[in-house]
Image (tube, rainbow, N blue to C red):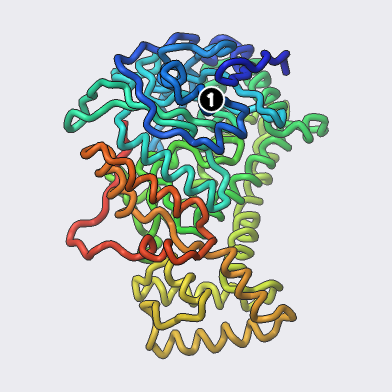
Amino acid sequence: MAEENVIIGTGWNFDNSYARLPESFFTKMTPPPVSLPKLIILNEPLAISLGLNVQALQSKDGAAELAGNQIPEGASPLAQAYAGHQFGHFNMLGDGRALLLGEQITPQGERVDIQLKGSGRTPYSRGGDGRAALGPMLREYIISEAMHALGIATTRSLAVVTTGELIIRETKQPGAILTRVAASHLRVGTFQYVSKWGSTEDLRDLADYTLQRHFPEIEADENRYLSLLKEVIKRQAVLISKWQLVGFIHGVMNTDNMALSGETIDYGPCAFLDAFVPATVFSSIDIHGRYAYGNQPHIAVWNLSRFAETLLPLLHDNEEEAVELAEDALSDFSELYHHHWIAGMRAKLGIFNEELEDESLIVSLLGLMQNSRADYTNTFRALTFDQPEDTDLFGSTEFVQWQELWQARLGRQQESKDASHQLMRNSNPALIPRNHRVEEALEAAVNQGDYSVMERLLDVLASPYAHSPEQAEYSTLPAQSSLPYRTFCGT
């Protein structure tokens, strides 16, 4: 898109293509400095892949850059404007506590956003202090890196620095800034903002930029904006199916938290299922269960419908024709999602080919799990290693009957039992970031300054399909509690 700067010093190689869009899309600004930046954790493999100098990032100047106290050469910090439906209600939003430093051009020629999250107030802060607490930033680091290891498209976490300052939430908490790496921060909410407050030409500029950034292969299509809608739908169908297959609950699927790149973005009150209960909600603010685990595919369609509405002026000059095109595209989501989900479920059960009765077999197992409140991850892990006695389903007549049907199904395919076992090993993680393990790591880090608990957790989460002996203790369930587990947005 533009000439790239020569890599020097820390290794930043910034370009700023987003800053060349209409000025109403963002506000350029310098982040307010923090008092005492200190590097807490650095994702060294990610840094190297980005072309960054690990040693330089670990220096005092490196910490200052990761805190926003020093602006790297070539960066052009800005806060992005966007809007969004939050729990169904439309609001003007924007980066209220984050700044996009610019786009790093990697040694492989890839372009990724580098964002500081928790960097201070912006014009879009809506009264907040723009800062972030250490706990939520470490949570995002842990969960996003676990998602990456699970093979799910996600933003990544490069580093967390503490600021040397206390911020006030319910209590005084240590402040921190997370450096987030993303394919981009283009959201459904970005289009909603331009659709409401911009011109049609502004909207076209944004759509063309999105095509150039993420979908260059369809730029020459006859109706490239319809192709854009269809491609975003495809990526979300894949993404949400992968969430469901590992039991991930995003927790706050507002339209501003749906990235057009198809990455998981904005890890706030996120968590993973223990017991398989589709109505599970962890977020303290999701009172009515709008974003429950079982609702996530439906909310994805709702969000995509809001995206489609913004594109109507570009889809066709005739509004009725535009609506018809959008509705036709949106109708594909359910089939696409179902295709990816059932393919993933077949793999989790060691099934290579397709039979019409497969869905009934899958749904029956999930029904047994729901009735028994069986652990989602551990049930599939037990099936993988032929250890049904380790599940809450063991001993019931219904489960025995299901096993007989499953074994008969496996016997009707050409692949060997060993091949099925390997497919299951590759499809069923040995562990997930268990909620109680994440809380244990955060408590030690925030309250005791002990980061070793988090480091050990990150080590075992880095290879979730290894099924190694040291992972076993991290697959155990939390102690019984009379209180439900609750997560918070962390703002």
Quarter that holds the N terminus: top right
Amino acid identity at mark 1: Ile
Crowd around label 1: few <14 · some 14–19 · many ≥20 (10 Å): many
Q: Secondary structure at mark 1?
A: strand
x, y (%) of residue 490? 31, 35
Rendering quarter of residue 267: top left
Quarter that holds the C terminus: top left
For the point 56% across and 9% down, the residue is: 23
Is residue 179 rendered to the left or right of residue 474?
Answer: right
Is residue 254 rendered to the left or right of residue 2?
Answer: left
x, y (%) of residue 212? 72, 26
In the rendered image, is residue 159 in sight?
Answer: yes
For the point 50% across and 65% down, the residue is: 467
Q: In the picture shown, does residue 169 fall above or below 404?
A: above
x, y (%) of residue 31? 41, 13
Rendering quarter of residue 220: top right
Q: In the picture shown, does residue 63 fall above or below 445?
A: above
x, y (%) of residue 186? 57, 28
